[in-house]
Image (cartoon, rainbow, N blue to C red):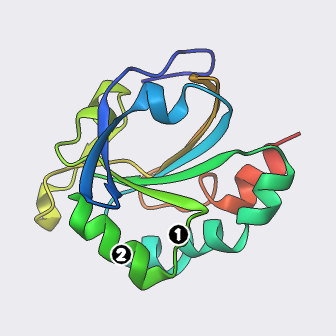
Amino acid sequence: MIAPGDTLPDVNLTIMGPEGPEPVSTDELFGAGTSVLFAVPGAFTPTCSAQHLPGYIANREQLGEKGVDRIVCMAVNDIFVMNAWGEHGGVDDGITMAADGNGEFARAIGLTFDASAFGMGERAQRFAIVIRDGKVDQLFVEAPGEFRVSSAEHVLDQLS
């Protein structure tokens, strides 16, 4: 599993651009500045939709005041699902919805779990990472079934 001090692996994620889906490398997305990447097991799932994404929407400005340049929400879903979920949840330009469609990034950082029992296959664990210039500064990984340390409120409290 990735740890504080590690450089993020360079893997492509997909974002929705003006012309449609666009690949973006993690180096390009997280290489400069301070980012918060939070991952959810799946778009439109109960905790993700009711608490996780709304918390980052509500705390976006406060995170910016603490020096966060970008907030990225990621799931092992396709970009069309991520885009629809963002629109449904009221996401604006302040949060980037990113798809890790095949789970390559989640696998590369060692943060996947098997959700086959729920018909969802391999998914990203619920986590948040504070990234500074492409390196992991802080890592918050949830225990199975929990939602505490990856919340926007917890991450906000950890930023100096």
Q: Is residue 127 left or right of residue 11?
A: right
Residue 83 rendering spot, x and y as whole percentages: 33, 69
Query: Residue 85 has which mark?
Result: 2
**What SS does tag 2 mark?**
helix
Q: Is residue 21 left or right of residue 145?
A: left
- Decide: is 156 above or below 105: below
Please give the name of the residue rendered at 34% of the width and 57% of the height, measured from the top-left corner: 17
Answer few, some or many: residues within 10 Å of disc 1's Cα (few below 14, many 20 plus, some between 14 and 19).
many
How far apart are the alpha carbons under marks 2 and 1?
A: 10 Å
Please give the name of the residue rendered at 56% of the width and 23% of the height, measured from the top-left corner: 134
Answer few, some or many: residues within 10 Å of disc 2's Cα (few below 14, many 20 plus, some between 14 and 19).
some
Dividing the picture into quarters, in which one does residue 136 lie? top right
Q: Contact (CB < 8 A) between labels 2 and 1? A: yes
Q: Quadrant of the N terminus?
A: top left
Q: Amino acid at mark 1?
A: Leu
Closer to the eye: label 2 or 1: 2
Q: Nearer the viewer, residue 42 or 72?
A: 72
Residue 13 rendering spot, x and y as whole percentages: 31, 41
Reading the image, the residue beneath label 1 is 53
Dividing the picture into quarters, in which one does residue 12 lie? top left
- Decide: is 32 above or below 142: above
Question: Does the rendering let one see residue 130?
Answer: yes
Please give the name of the residue rendered at 51% of the width and 81% of the height, measured from the top-left corner: 90
Question: Does the rendering let one see residue 77?
Answer: no
Residue 48 rendering spot, x and y as whole percentages: 44, 70
Q: Amino acid at mark 2?
A: Trp
Q: Nearer the viewer, residue 49 or 63?
A: 63
Q: Quadrant of the C terminus?
A: top right
Dividing the picture into quarters, in which one does residue 9 lie? top left
**What SS does tag 1 mark?**
helix
